[in-house]
Image (tube, rainbow, N blue to C red):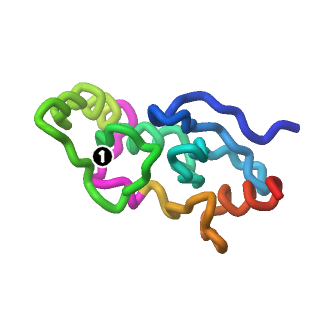
Amino acid sequence: MTRVCVFAKTGGDGSTAAFWIDDDGRQRIVHMGSGSGSTLTCVLADDAVDFLRLLAIGYDEICWGGFSSAPHHDDHSSPKHNDLYRDWVRTTFAVDIPVSGESIVRHEDYMQDAEPADPFCRWVSQVGG
């Protein structure tokens, strides 16, 4: 059985987001760094609504991590450009949009981490070698 299914690009470096079936049979949304740019390898969200909330925060690219901080924007890229989407997520799912992603992304681990706390990063380490 295939346990990973890529569905989106997360940055210009070739990193992707995927659905992953964990060891308990739960579907989660994960990040797979490209390795040539981002090495972020972790569960991004436990479900689709939390993934939509993470996107609504307004990070330019989610491949680089940094979820403990609010997004940084230059003058051309403002969180205000995301207002319609943010409002849709809030009202459609009756959820809040946090200032940063740290309440959604529990463990920000990377391919090179010797002892990752993130279950997806540990799984990738085990199946990859």
Classify residue 66 by image quadrant.
Answer: bottom left
Residue 57 x, y percent position in the rendering? 30, 43
**Residue displayed at 16% across by 33% down:** 80
Query: Per the image, is 23 magenta?
Result: no
Callout 1 crowding tier (Cα within 10 Å): few <14, some 14–19, many ≥20: some
- Label 1 SS: loop
Residue 123 x, y percent position in the rendering? 74, 58
Left or right position of 124 against 40? right
Residue 43 x, y percent position in the rendering? 58, 52
The stretch of residues the image draws in magenta is 92-103
**Of all residues shown, which one is farthest toward the left?**
75
**Where is 94 relative to 112, above or below?**
above
Q: Callout 1, which amino acid? A: Ile
Of the 4 image quadrants, the one containing the N terminus is top right
Q: Choose between 49 and 21: the one closer to the eye.
A: 21
Left or right position of 8 against 64? right
**Where is 5 relative to 42, above or below?**
above
- Give the labeled residue for mark 1: 97
Left or right position of 11 against 29? left
**Residue displayed at 26% across by 54% down:** 70
Query: Per the image, is 102 magenta?
Result: yes
**Of all residues shown, which one is farthest toward the bottom?**
115
Residue 29 seen in render: no
**Residue displayed at 66% across by 72% down:** 114
**Where is 40 relative to 56, above or below?**
below
